[in-house]
Image: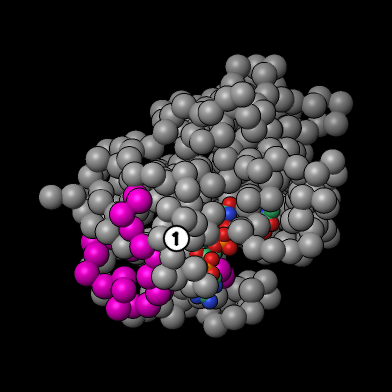
Amino acid sequence: MPYSVAVAGASGYAGGEALRLLSAHPELEVRTATAHSNAGQRLIDVHPHLRSLAALDLVETSAATLAGHDVVVLALPHGASGALAAELPDDVLVLDLGADHRLTNEADWNRFYGSEWHGSWAYGLPELLHSGSGRQRDALAGARRIAVPGCNVTAVTLGLAPGIRAGVIEPGDLTAALAVGPSGAGRSLTTELLASELLGSAAPYAVGGVHRHIPEILQNLAVAGAESPTISFTPVLVPMSRGILATVTARLVPGTSAAAVRDAWVDAYATEHFVHVLPEGRFPRTADVLGANTAMMGVAVDADAGRAVVIVAIDNLVKGTAGAAIQSLNIALGLDETLGLPFDGLAP
Ligand SMILES: NC(=O)C1=CN([C@@H]2O[C@H](COP(=O)(O)OP(=O)(O)OC[C@H]3O[C@@H](n4cnc5c(N)ncnc54)[C@H](OP(=O)(O)O)[C@@H]3O)[C@@H](O)[C@H]2O)C=CC1
Ligand SMILES: CC(=O)N[C@@H](CCC(=O)OP(=O)(O)O)C(=O)O
C-alpha cells in the first residue's frame, strides 16, 4: 500500500514541483491537492504540465481537507502553515516548505518575519554537517515534523559548512552573492517580476544584511561548528526562470594549504548522492542542475586574497525545496533516501 499524500498550496510553484516529483515516487500516492484563490479549479488547468495528476481537483486548504493522509506537504506563504500544522495529528508526517518552523531562535523569527512564532522542527537538509561528526540526516530518521530549508540557504550552507567543520576557514567575514531566478519568489503578480522589468536586467534586492535567510544560514553554520559566524549576503534577481548560482567566500585560516581546502569539500560530500564537488578548476552553471535534486559546486583558493571561493548551483524548486522535502521524507519514513528523486538535469 503506498503512503497517501496531500499537498497544500498545490497551485503555487513549490507545491506544483512537489506534485511533479511525488507523482513519480514509487511508494507515494497523491490523493489531495489544496489551494486558496484557485480552489475549485482542476489541477491540470492550473499546472498543465502535470498530466499524470489530471484527475485531481484543487480543494480548499484546511485541516479537514488535509485529514486522513499519511503525509502532508505544506507549500504555503510564510505565516500560513504554523496554525494549520498545529491542527494535524502527531503521527502524520508533515513537511513545511515555508519558513514557519525553520528558526530555533524566537528573536530571529520576530526580527525577520514578525508573524506568530510556532517553534522549530527537525531541519530538512540531510547533508548538513554537524560539528565534530554526524550529519543532519540522523535527526530526520523517524521524524514526523520537518522544516524544509529556504532555497538560498541550502546553496550557501552546503557551500560553506565543509570548510567550517574542517576548521580551514574563518567563520567571521563570510560573503555570499547569489544570482537567483524569479520562480523563487513564487507565482505572484508583483511589478519587479513582470517580464518587462525582469528580462534583460539584473536586479539586486534585500541588500545590506536584511534578507530573512541570514539567520537561517548562521543557524546552520553554527550546527556545523562555527562560533559567532557573520555573513554578508546579497541576492540578485536575474532573468532565468529557475536556478540559484551562489558564490560564497571565506577567509582562510592562516597556514591552510590549497590541498587542505579542497580535501575539506571533497571529503565532506564524497558519500553524498545529491551533492557533487567538481574536479579542480571547474565550476557549475545553473543549467547543469535544472530539474535535478543536485547541488553542484566548484572550489577554488584565491591565494592573493587569502580566501576560499566556492560556487554552488542548485535548482531552487528541486534541491532548494521540493526535492529536499522528498529526500527528507524518504529518510523519515525509512525508505531509500534517493527514491523518486531525479539525478539528471534538463539541458540545454
Ligand atoms: N519558490 C521557491 O523556489 C521556494 C519556495 N519555498 C517556500 O514554499 C512556500 C510556497 O512558495 P511558492 O510556491 O513559491 O509560492 P506561490 O505564491 O507560488 O504559491 C503559494 C501557494 O499558497 C496558496 N496560498 C496563498 N495564500 C494563502 C493563504 N492565505 N492560505 C492558504 N494558502 C494560501 C496559493 O494558493 P492560490 O494560488 O490558489 O491562491 C498557492 O497555492 C513559501 O513558504 C516559500 O517560501 C521554499 C523554497 C523555495
Ligand atoms: C527570487 C526570490 O525572491 N527568492 C526568494 C527565495 C525564497 C525561498 O526559497 O525561500 P523561502 O522558502 O524562505 O521563501 C527570496 O530571496 O526571498
Q: Work out whether residue 154 can be spotted.
A: no
Q: Residue at x 61, y 24 (%)?
A: 348
| Callout 1: CB less than 8 Å from ligand 1 | yes
Q: Residue at x 59, y 21 (%)?
A: 278
Q: Residue at x 63, y 29 (%)?
A: 287
Instruction: Decide: is 184 above or below 319.
Output: below
> How far across and down, in percent of the image, does residue 51 sit?
39, 44
> How far across and down, in percent of the image, does residue 145 sit?
35, 64
Alpha-carbon neighbours of circle 1 within 10 Å: few (<14), some, or many (≥20)?
Answer: many
Decide if residue 111 is on the left or right side of residue 325: right
> How far across and down, in percent of the image, does residue 88 sit?
31, 75
The magenta-colored residue range is: 53-78
Give 129 or 45, whichever is nearer the viewer. 45
Q: Work out whether residue 314 can be spotted.
A: yes
Q: Taking the image as four quarters, which one is ligand 1 found in?
A: bottom right
> How far across and down, in percent of the image, does residue 289 sit?
56, 31
Decide if residue 159 is on the left or right side of residue 62: right
Instruction: Decide: is 241 above or below 110.
Output: above
Question: As shown in the figure, which amino acid type bears the numbered disc 1?
Answer: Ala
Decide if residue 96 is on the left or right side of residue 182: left
Give 69 or 114, whichever is nearer the viewer. 69
SS assignment at label 1: loop
| In the image, farthest residue toward the left | 1
Please tell me in which quadrant of the rendered image residue 10 appears: bottom left
Q: How many marks?
A: 1
Q: Magenta includes 121?
A: no
